Structure formats: C-alpha cells, structure tokens
Image (spheres, helix red, strand yellow):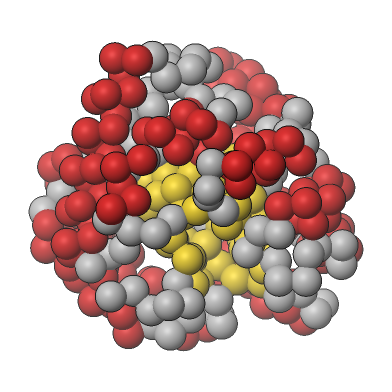
Amino acid sequence: MPRSKEIVSVSSDIAGLFGRPKDVAEVYSDCQKIVDFGFEVICWRGINTNYFDDVRSLGLRVNGLHGLVSAVRESYSGSSLANRIKGRIVDGLMVGTNRLPELSTASRASYVLIHQRLVDSPESVNHVAEATHGFYRDTILMVENVCNRGSIDKTVTAVDQLSERGVVAGVMIDLVHLLKDMANSPDNLSSRETQKHWNRALSMIDSVAGRVKTLGFHIPIGLNQSDSLPIETMDRQLWIQFAQLLAKCPGVRFKTIENQRPNARTPFLISRQEMTLLKERNYRLLSQLKEAGVI
Ligand SMILES: [Zn+2]
C-alpha cells in the first residue's frame, strides 16, 4: 500500500491544450477503482478559478499546478526552426511566475511545479523565491529536471538555493527527462535504450533522495513518443525495481501520471471514439503500475 502521505495525481495534459476537467475525469474514471487520485493542472495563460471550481464539482481535488516551462531552451525541443517556433508558442501559452501565488491560493494545491531552466541563475532563483511568499501555506514548490545533460544535478542545486532563501522546495523527477539526461540524447526512448539507462537512472534517484527532503515523480505514459516512456514494451521488472527503490526513500511525496496524446491530437478535444480507447488504455496501464507497486 502507498504510504498515506503520498499524493497520486493525473495530469490534465491528456485532455489537449486546455484540458477540460470533465474530459480528464472521464478518461480516468475507471482508474478510481485502482488508486485515489487528484489532478495536476497544466496552467495555460487563460486559466482562472472557474477551472478549479469545475474540478471540485466533479468530486476531485487539485493536487498540483504545472507552471511555466522553458520549451525553447530545453533540448527535447531540438534546434530546428519548426521546434523553436513550437517552443515559443508553448512558452507563450503558459502562465507567468507572477500568477502562481494567486493560483496557489485559489486551488490550495499541494504543489506548484516549474521546470529547472526557470531557476538556473541567481536572479531567476530570487524571482521565483519572491513569488512563493504569496503561496497558499501548504503549497510546496517542486522543480522538475529537464532533458538537458546534467539537468538533474542542476535541479538539486536550485532546490538547495531556494531552501537557503527559506522556500519549502523539492525535486520532481521526470523519468523521461532523466533517461534522456542519462542517455545524453534528446531522441525518443526505445525500450532497449530505456533498459540500458534504467539502472543509472535508479542510482541517480537514490542519490537525489539522499540530498533533498521532498521528492516527486512524473511518470509519463502517454502516446506522444517524444515525451513518454515506451511503456507498452517495457519489461515489468523495471517497474518493480523502481517501486522497490521508492519504498526505501522516505521523502517521496508525489507521484503524477503524465499522459500526452500524439502532437497532432493535442490541440483538439478528445473524440468519442478516442475516449473509449484512452479509457481502456489508462485502466490497463494504471493496473500494471499498481500491480508493480509504483502507485
Ligand atoms: Zn514532466
């Protein structure tokens, strides 16, 4: 059984750019038999308190808020012109750091998340630390590692610097970003590559767990191959090793399922036919994660 202080969430990323709460709830509705979960809400620029009210009216909690990323500067975006343009669009659509206090208070989320590239200079650390003064009293700031080489170590450093400034902060380890950091390549992960780098990734998780007080995990199981694990072909044993390691780490607080659809589908709402397929897939994959002891 998960320790009671662990908080399991599903990301609103599955429901397209603007992630309607009722679609997120429906696509995971069968999974409530498997695990008790709330939402990690992707905070697009247009978000307001109505969104949180809608989540609550569905009988669900807002556990986490996903704030700004820096897609332009993260290596998975690649350096082609098309990717730079896409990165700029994504960055431009996300809420700015200045809105995080208001959203933290309105949602009473357990955590607010930003990517490591947002806190990679003394000025940016100070700017983010300043914003956290306005957070709801129980909201923790989580910093997520990105794909760039060495990002995981930089994430721990940033969390140390934030803690020195009195911020309650932790590390959110994204498994895909960590494996790409270990592989030193932004390429999509095959099951062979995943297997090859898994042990080094677990050693790194063990090391990070010894260096920070609060730890969370992004577990990306989506169909967008550029930002998801090859979960359909991964050896079950890898998940068991991961679960056994986490069970030994007292600082693990958050486990969040990310689940992006293919890029071409992301701007659109989930169709009825797609909903049926995704619901079945989510139930099957979350059952496997539960069985392996991950959630
Ligand atoms: Zn992530």
From the viewer's side, name the closer residue of 55 and 114: 55
> Looking at the rendering, in which quadrant would you find the N terminus?
bottom left
Q: Where is residue 209 in the image (x, y as percent from the top left)?
A: 45, 79
Q: Position of residue 123 (x, y in %)?
A: 86, 59
Q: Residue visible at 60% across and 52% down?
A: 62
Q: Residue visible at 24% across and 25% down?
A: 277
Is residue 97 found left or right of 183 in the rendered image? Answer: right
Q: Residue visible at 12% across and 57% down?
A: 236
Q: In this view, does 269 lie above or below 235?
A: above
Q: Where is residue 100 in the image (x, y as percent from the top left)?
A: 79, 50
From the viewer's side, name the closer residue of 88 and 139: 139
Q: Residue visible at 48% across and 17% down?
A: 269
Q: In this view, does 136 lie above or below 93?
A: below
Give the quadrant of residue 198.
Answer: bottom left
Q: In this view, does 27 lie above or below 3?
A: above
Whether residue 123 is visible, yes or no, is no
Give the quadrant of residue 34.
Answer: bottom left
Whether residue 110 is visible, yes or no, is yes
